[in-house]
Amino acid sequence: EDQVTQSPEALRLQEGESSSLNCSYTVSGLRGLFWYRQDPGKGPEFLFTLYSAGEEKEKERLKATLTKKESFLHITAPKPEDSATYLCAVQGVETSGSRLTFGEGTQLTVNP
Amino acid sequence: DVKVTQSSRYLVKRTGEKVFLECVQDMDHENMFWYRQDPGLGLRLIYFSYDVKMKEKGDIPEGYSVSREKKERFSLILESASTNQTSMYLCASITGQGGFKPQHFGDGTRLSIL
């Protein structure tokens, strides 16, 4: 059974204070790992897909990295508009259809 | 851009009612999903469908059923609503054709069962 654990549950940062969110996963064989951003009252919005250990993807102040056991979402010099819940999800090679297993998310608050 | 539309943003129903949640996508996607999202539990898969009239149970199907009569529309049915089904319900879709693509989500239906 695929499992995803995200930490911390909640994170408060000052504007400009860089930090990282963690996503640890257990999967029989990783087909891919996704990062999503979710604003209050909205559905998750896709950010990145990572496929293999060592891969990195960047978008504005966000950079996602992947190892064989975990992924990090690095936030550099965050702004208040980066405040959201960040979700990590995995799909294993033995998973039927396009099913994903999600973590519980990290709620990020960036104070001005 | 992919558009996944859920028919209601907020819904209040009574215990024992039959409740229908509707989801429509405009990108001709083969696969569609229903999740519920609860604090501390994350997103949990209720049912998914990989083609018209095809469905598979997810991790928490009890108390729910689904209908997919047309490719663009996927309905979640609460046969007899109970208070423990109060939750945020999210619909998602993805193409079944080649490659490895992200799921696209609607904005959710916040359902309260009184």
Image: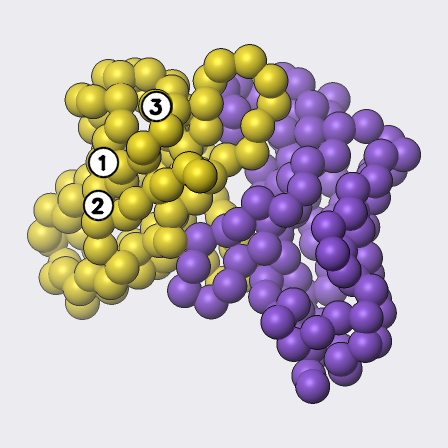
- Residue B75 visible: yes
Q: Amino acid at mark 1?
A: Ser
Mark 2 closeness class: few <14, some 14–19, many ≥20 residues within 10 Å:
many
Between label 3 and label 1, give the one nearer the viewer.
3
Q: Nearer the viewer, residue A55 or B37?
A: A55
**Cα separation between marks 3 and 2:** 20 Å
Pointer 3 residue: B28
Mark 3 closeness class: few <14, some 14–19, many ≥20 residues within 10 Å:
some
Q: Is residue A32 left or right of residue B66?
A: right
Q: Which label's residue is closer to the chain start, 3 or 1?
A: 3
Given contact means CB atoms under 8 Å apart, are the residues at marks 3 and 2 in contact?
no
**Cα separation between marks 1 and 2:** 6 Å
Pointer 1 residue: B75
Chain B, colour shown: yellow
Q: Give residue B114's position: percent from left, percent from top.
A: 18, 67
Residue at 44% from the left image edge and 53% from the top image edge: A43
Q: Nearer the viewer, residue B31 or A46?
A: A46
Q: Give residue B5's position: percent from left, percent from top.
A: 30, 45
Q: Amino acid at mark 3?
A: Asp
Q: Secondary structure at mark 3?
A: loop
Q: Amino acid at mark 2?
A: Leu
The chain carrying label 3 is B
Chain in purple in the render: A
Farthest residue in the top direction? Answer: B98
- Residue B46 visible: no
